[in-house]
Image: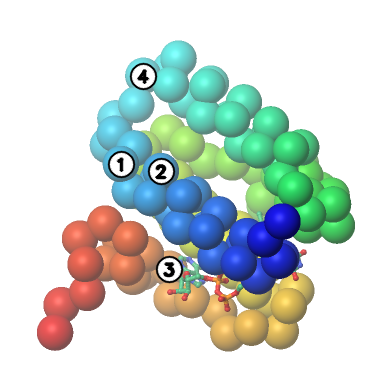
């Protein structure tokens, strides 16, 4: 099985890429499905301690998923990733740049 770091990098790529392809104005049904997806993802994530903390984060007041637009969902994912960065003693990412990193590409 992949180690926790390889799994993490691949998973963040998937998660941020999902937010990048999310519609600017998602239907109520998609918003519900997305919230369900995140909760199941947090339940099934194959690193037990990671999964437990991510579930707690999603259930907390400032961690509750915000999925009513691409911009909001992308920001939320960036903040969720920063919460893990902080826990691991990594640098925080500037969430003003999530779209540049994951959707439109860095400008030179
Ligand atoms: P990663 O953190 O994997 O980031 C990959 C790339 O994303 C970076 O190079 C950067 O370009 C970009 N990036 C960084 N921060 C952000 C941000 N905030 N928003 C947008 N883009 C960003 N590991 C543990 O050891 N313990 C845990 O409890 C744990 N929990 C995790 C929970 C989840 C849900 C996930 C997906 C991963 C978790 N991990 C955990 C793995 C950990 O977050 C990292 O993926 C792993 O340590 C590898 O880190 P990295 O430095 O290579 O970059």
Earlier-in-chain disc, 4 versus 2: 2
Circles 4 and 1: CB atoms closer than 8 Å: no
Earlier-in-chain disc, 3 versus 1: 1
Using the image, determine if residue 54 lies above or below residue 9: above
Task: Name the residue that disc number 3 marks.
Answer: 95
* Mark 4 close to ligand 1, CB under 8 Å: no
Task: Name the residue that disc number 1 marks.
Answer: 21
Task: Name the residue that disc number 2 marks.
Answer: 18
Circles 3 and 2: CB atoms closer than 8 Å: no
Determine the image quadrant of residue 22: top left
Earlier-in-chain disc, 3 versus 2: 2
Task: Name the residue that disc number 4 marks.
Answer: 27
Mark in the foreground, 4 or 1: 1
Seen at 76% across and 37% down, the residue is: 43
Earlier-in-chain disc, 3 versus 4: 4
Q: Could you tell me which quadrant the N terminus lies in?
A: bottom right
Circles 3 and 4: CB atoms closer than 8 Å: no
* Horizontal and vertical percent position of residue 80: 60, 58
View extreme (top): residue: 29
Q: Secondary structure at mark 2?
A: helix
Q: Secondary structure at mark 3?
A: helix
Circles 1 and 2: CB atoms closer than 8 Å: yes
Determine the image quadrant of residue 41: top right
* Horizontal and vertical percent position of residue 81: 58, 63
For mark 4, does the 10 Å Cα neighbourhood hold few (<14), some (14 to 19), or many (20 or more) residues?
few
């Amino acid at each position: 099985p992949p180690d926790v770091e390889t799994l993490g990098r691949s998973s963040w790529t998937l998660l941020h890429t999902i937010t990048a392809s999310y519609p600017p104005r998602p239907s109520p049904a998609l918003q519900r499905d997305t919230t369900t997806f995140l909760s199941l993802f947090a339940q099934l994530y194959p690193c037990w301690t990671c999964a437990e903390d991510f579930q707690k984060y999603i259930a907390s007041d400032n961690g509750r998923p915000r999925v009513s637009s691409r911009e909001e969902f992308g920001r939320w994912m960036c903040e969720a990733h920063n919460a893990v960065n902080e826990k691991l003693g990594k640098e925080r990412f500037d969430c003003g740049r999530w779209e540049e990193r994951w959707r439109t590409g860095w400008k030179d």
